Amino acid sequence: MAQRKGYPSDVSDAEWMFVAPYLALVREDAPHREHALRDVFNALRYLVKTGC
């Protein structure tokens, strides 16, 4: 998977360690998962922050 450039709205490592256990209903490496959970969380956070 290619690494993307981060955005200012992206969650920090410390924030991710706090929130990840509440979001992960299946393992991060589950075969049906197409996108990393952290990337999805960052996208939602960006939408909320910018009001897009």
Image: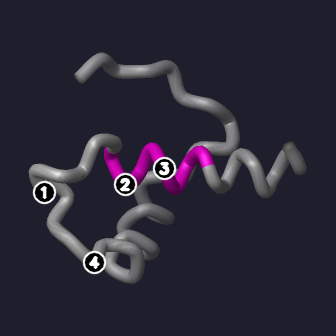
Whether residue 31 sits left or right of residue 51 in the image: it is left
Distance (Cα) linking label 2 and label 1: 11 Å
Look at mark 1 in the image and give the residue it sits on. 30
Which residue is label 2 attached to? 37
Q: Looking at the image, which residue is at 36% across and 67% down?
A: 17
Q: Is residue 10 above or below residue 18?
A: above
Q: What's the image's color scheme?
A: one colour
Q: Dot 3, crowdedness within 10 Å: few (<14), some or many (≥20)?
A: few
Amino acid of disc 4: Leu
Location of residue 43 with respect to 13 vertically, above or below: above
Task: Give the residue number, with chain letter if any, for mark 3.
Answer: 40
Residue placed most toward the observer, 10 or 24 = 24
The residues colored magenta run 36-43
Can you identify the residue that label 4 sits on? 25
5 sits to left or right of 44: left
Q: Give the secondary structure at mark 1.
A: loop
Amino acid type, callout 1: Ala
